[in-house]
Amino acid sequence: MSLNGKVALVTGGAQGIGRAVVQLLLQTSAKVAMVDLNKACGEECKAQLDVEFGEGNCTFISCDVSNGDALRDAFQRTVDKFGRLDIVINNAGINNEKNWEKTIQVNLTSVIKGTYLALEHMSKEYSKEGGTIINVSSMAAFLHSPHQPVYTATKHGVIGFTRAIADASSQGDYGVRINVLCPAFVDTPLLHSVEHEDNMGKFVKFKDDFRRSMTKFGVLQPSLIAEGMMRLIMDTTLNGAVMKITCSKGIHFHTYEPMSA
Ligand SMILES: NC(=O)c1ccc[n+]([C@@H]2O[C@H](COP(=O)([O-])OP(=O)(O)OC[C@H]3O[C@@H](n4cnc5c(N)ncnc54)[C@H](O)[C@@H]3O)[C@@H](O)[C@H]2O)c1
Ligand SMILES: CCCCC/C=C\C=C\[C@H](O)C/C=C\C/C=C\CCCC(=O)O
């Protein structure tokens, strides 16, 4: 399994799930642009990856994905540095019910923008060579988590958008496969956001419910989510697929009723 010669861009790549994905992409010989808001974490992460994989394979781009111009620039800088783009992981996300408009910007609007920018750099519509996009949703999209209404809405949105644009890609012969990944709880700093009023607003009083949910459903390791991503990257039959990863069932796919008149 090698991605030698391929170039990937991962948003939110400095920490948590994104970081595990960057690591696995480098292990598989891809070149990787790690795009993240957190400059200190991104630079520290790049320094460690340079030691492990050698300099020149990974670049860190400091960028707030909710700033459209900055995101466009991050894509361009990736192509300027590595010469092409083949894999885009729209992973950056936040859990903030207090500043819920920001949550919509980061979790949904930026995923849509990231997908359109990826298509500009990879789609045959733009005379490019094709590629693959993975958008990160959540099992919250299936459980409609009661104390995270806006987070849940954004993750529903990511699934709906991804399935629709995946169909547009196959009908329009873009040469780009677009899939969505929905993890259950994963052991990353995001999980601690449920403890903070700054993140949860009035829902913070339910933090014990969250803790009970985590005990009930279990908590996954980021490396398993990276393994799921790699399946979506490598399996060329998948387009518009909704991958779920849970403790009870591992890596599996959601199935939908076929459309009927
Ligand atoms: N951890 C979980 O339990 C879990 C479960 C399901 C889905 N997810 C989703 O997985 C994705 C990654 O989450 P995580 O758990 O690794 O979170 P995390 O908080 O550990 O890491 C997220 C990364 O995204 C970056 N980021 C946040 N806002 C950004 C912005 N505006 N611009 C650029 N970078 C930004 C952060 O700096 C951080 O490095 C998110 O979309 C999240 O909703 C997480
Ligand atoms: C109950 C919500 C807790 C919120 C924790 C903070 C942010 C993380 C959100 C993630 O996106 C995960 C959300 C929900 C998934 C949880 C469990 C599903 C397990 C289903 C199963 O095992 O069958």
Image (cartoon, rainbow, N blue to C red):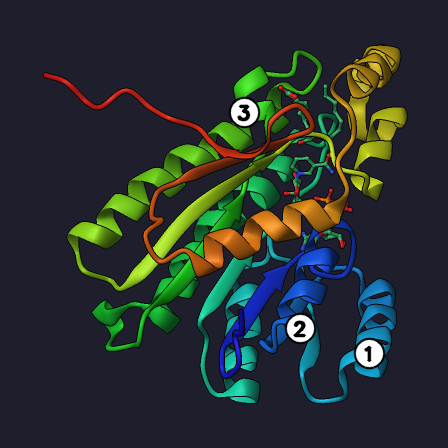
Q: In which image quadrant can residue 15 be found?
A: bottom right
When the figure is inspected, residue 123 is found, relative to residue 238, above or below; the finding is below
The image's mark for residue 141 is 3
Q: CA distance from mark 3 to mark 2?
A: 30 Å
The residue carrying pointer 2 sits among few (fewer than 14), some (14 to 19) or many (20 or more) residues within 10 Å by Cα, namely many
The residue lying at 24 percent from left, 70 percent from top is 124
Which numbered mark, 3 or 2, is in the foreground of this view? Answer: 2
* Amino acid type at image mark 2: Leu
Q: Which residue is mark 2?
A: 26
* Amino acid type at image mark 3: Ala
The image's mark for residue 52 is 1
Q: Report the front residue among 241 and 113.
A: 241
Task: Locate residue 234, reporting x and y percent.
Answer: 45, 60
Q: Report the front residue among 253 and 131.
A: 253
Task: Locate residue 100, reporting x and y percent.
Answer: 66, 30
Residue furthest out toward the front: 1
The image's mark for residue 138 is none
The residue lying at 87 percent from left, 66 percent from top is 40
